[in-house]
Image (cartoon, rainbow, N blue to C red):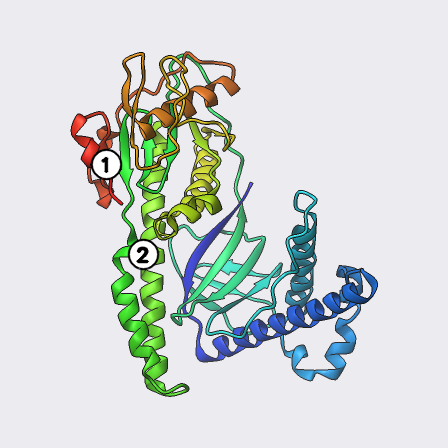
Amino acid sequence: MYIRQNFRIYPTKEQQQFFLQDIGNQRFIWNYVLGKSIEKYKQENKFIWYNEAASLLPELKKELEWLKLGNSQALQQTLKDLDQAFKVAFKRAGQRSGFPKFKKKSHGGSCRYPSGCVIIGNTISVPKLKTKIKIRGKNLPNEVKSVTIILRPSGKWFISCVVEIPEVEKVQINENSKAVGIDLNSRFFAVLDTGDAVVNPKHLLKKEKALKRYQRRMARKVKGSKNREKQRIKVARKHEQVANQRKEFVEQVTMQIAKEYDIICIEDLNVKAMQQWNGRMIQSAPFAMFRSKLTWKANKYGKHLIVIDRFVPTSKVCNECGQIHDMSDLNDRWLSCDCGLEMHRDHNAAINIRYIGLSTVGTTGIYASGDTKVHGLDVHGIRWVSLKEENTRSLDVY
């Protein structure tokens, strides 16, 4: 199994210039071949695939001497990435989603080295670069499959290493296994079938005023001036701060869930449809990152992750009697059933998600045991609330 590990690096000015050259070279090759391929598609209804694109490189290097300054393997990898981008864009579910996008020259960027990178101690060597780069981090890998050098808009440099780790055997499912259903939504970030919920910290919304203030200041600066560049870095660092807070929040929540439960059932969300209802709230809730991190941690600890279909009406069906209710009004947060059940709609959905998830593994006798409060409320800044209490009718946070 392959995973990515990211570390902060501190390249010298000469090393930065080397990476900037490779970033520019790879961007040029991507845009050049993409433009040629689009032109060919309009004339002949055909694309320029990898083999044909690779044959263009020798002639380009003769015409443009500065292409020789970069890493040849990196340019080949750029063509492979573009080839894959075309396949994804035009063969996803048999539908055309448009051409790949051109890469713009910006204050950030990345360059990828498919092989030849070696980590020695707290340094890494890159092909064609004579000096080694310092890395900051713990548990550095001994061997890497590929390396991507990343320049953030804030001016910070990072390295993303693809490393291979051994497969972890899945835990055996029995009557003592602990299962949980999780309903993700924009009001509470995640609701567990135990009745406990993680409150969405809304990092982006909290920093929105400061970001707007910084952006207004940057707009008043003269373009190309040093003062504008200083203000641009402040804006980029504020965005980076929000991204780091969001990532740390997801890491902590997924770690707690993956360690506590053996079977984790979640819903396949349609995030685009949710954005039409409440776009700003959805943007502040990192659902895609949560799904990705939870998948990785479930594999790491040998847990079972079950994803149910997004079209199952989990919020509308009473988990006690199976009666279907009209819950189309999203402001109606409580389900009142004829069987006497009174429950928060998200709590009810989480229970249904667990039932459906467990049915796919051939058992319905496993119930979510334990209480997330065992980990403690407000642990590491994560706010947990209970949806079991009647007073939570006024607890929904918009």
Q: Is residue 374 left or right of residue 293?
A: left
- In terms of depth relative to the viewer, which is nearer, 45 or 47? 45
Residue appearing at x 76%, y 81% in the figure:
62
Residue 354 x, y percent position in the rendering = 41, 23
| Front disc: 2 or 1 | 2
Q: How many tags in the picture? A: 2
Q: Quadrant of the C terminus?
A: top left
Q: What amino acid type should be assigned to the residue bearing mark 1?
A: Trp
Asked whether residue 258 is in view, the answer is no
Q: What amino acid type should be assigned to the residue bearing mark 2?
A: Leu
Residue appearing at x 24%, y 32% in the figure:
375
Q: Which of marks 2 and 1 is nearer the N terminus?
A: 2
- Name the element at disc 2: helix
Q: In which quarter of the image is residue 339?
A: top left
In the image, residue 279 sits, relative to residue 291, either above or below, namely: below
Per the image, the residue denoted by label 2 is 204
Per the image, the residue denoted by label 1 is 384
